[in-house]
Image (spheres, grey):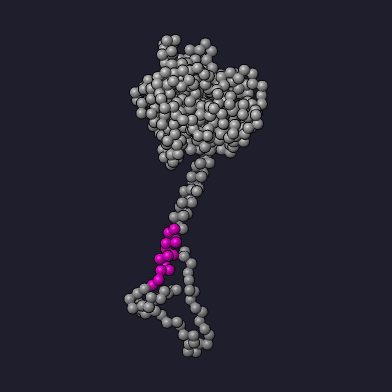
Amino acid sequence: MASTACIPPVPAPGDAVGLRERARGALLGLAVGDALGAPAENMKPSEIRARWGRITGYVARKPAGTDDTEYAIFSGLLLARYGSALTPAHVETAWHEWIADREEGPFRGAGFSERGTLENLRRGLAAPISAQHRHAWSDGLAMRAAPYGVFAAGRPAEAARLVAIDGSVSHEGEGIYGGQAVAAGVAAAMAGAPTVAVVASALAVVPDDSWTARCLRRAMTAAHRGERAVRSAVVIGGYPWTDLAPEAVALAFGAYAAADGDFTDAVLTAVNMGRDADTTAAVAGALAGATQGAAAIPAEWASAIGPARGSCLPAMAGHHVLEVADLLTRGAEKGQRGAEVAQRGAEKGQRGAEVAQRGAEAGTRRTEPATRSGGTGVPSAGPATRGAETKAPSPEPATRSADTKTPSPEPATRSADTKTPSPEPATRTDRDAPTGVAP
């Protein structure tokens, strides 16, 4: 894995776009992207053009978020409850409490990874065994990863750590890496990082030789040539499902980079590339929303987003992404203050160590053996010579004239003031076979 030390420094929250504004932009941007992309899910660009031309706004009569938004709310509420103390046991309990142990109804919009996880949990399997199913590399974690970046604003490594804990119940390998890339990217964007640093932060938390990292690098190489080039560089043609995490995450980052962080351009680029369009547009919207803040989201798009309907997760009905953003902002501010205190403590400790080092060096100089011309080479405990005297001093006589007591000797010493990822398909064509249902 790339060292987290490679994550570029980012400005602390508190710039012209405030932390709360960025948090609301990230999660509202996710929901807007989800609603814009839902009608184009599993479609090719040619099919999108044939039906709508180029999508430039909502094409659904009643636009709404899908499972992407509801699972993001799920993860946001979970994180608001436990914060940095989150454990796999907390996540597993929440899956049971809010999803697995409820009457689910039709469970519309669920992806394969969620289905596989629920089946395992209902059979009594616990994490990480619950994540061992045939779609553990899906983008189901990536679609719910943005809240971790909001919570860990300016701390991409912490965002990546937390989202991996969430993902341990439902994903493995590339599925985890996709979620980590999104969480780290949003965390950097939340602190005002430029587009290139947001992408670098995502790459820094995933293994260099992973399928996810390779797809991200290909997308970044093609981004300046636009959406068609990004899609051609990333899409696994001929594969029937569109929920591949490496592909979806790379398309989302590619759209974000091609738009240089502009919200409208990033989201519409992701939508018009098709494939898992609701997820790619949701991720691109979260990245761009964190970069520019909620004010950058067109008002007619933002106003269409209401409380979750619970069409996928009934337990999430009535919760609004802005409510979750505000909860996480308080956690982010607390985490920021804690990080600042820790930094001050580290700086104070460093200064103390430097003072101690200087003292030790000074003490070493005072206790070095005294070798002088004509001397015997015997170290002196105190000042060895005075004036022009060059020989080692003789011990003071034990008796003196008219003195009957023995002198006290001078003190001899002085105190010196730390499942195997799904194989990447070997062939890529421009033929999609979107016959399955993806998150």
Residue positioned most to the bottom: 402
User: Foreground residue, 224 or 171?
Assistant: 171
Give the answer, above or below, for where 84 lies relative to 139: below
Disc tally is 0
Residue 101, can we see it?
A: yes
Q: Position of residue 272 (x, y in %)?
A: 43, 17
Q: Position of residue 170 (x, y in %)?
A: 56, 30
Give the answer, above or below, for where 383 lies relative to 160: below
Q: Which residues are magenta?
A: 357-370
> Residue at position x 65%, y 31% from top?
124
Give the answer, above or below, for where 331 lies relative to 394: above
SS majority, magenta: helix
Residue positioned most to the front: 426
User: Foreground residue, 313 or 385?
Assistant: 313
Residue 368 falls within the magenta-colored stretch: yes
User: Foreground residue, 105 or 352?
Assistant: 105
> Residue at position x 47%, y 89% from top?
401
Q: Position of residue 378 (x, y in %)?
A: 41, 76
> Residue at position x 52%, y 37% from top?
161
User: Which quadrant of the view contains residue 363?
Assistant: bottom left
Give the answer, above or below, for where 363 lies relative to 158: below
User: Foreground residue, 186 or 225?
Assistant: 225
Quarter of the image with the N terminus in it = top left
Residue 201, can we see it?
A: no
> Residue at position x 58%, y 35% from top?
128
Q: Position of residue 90 (x, y in %)?
A: 62, 34
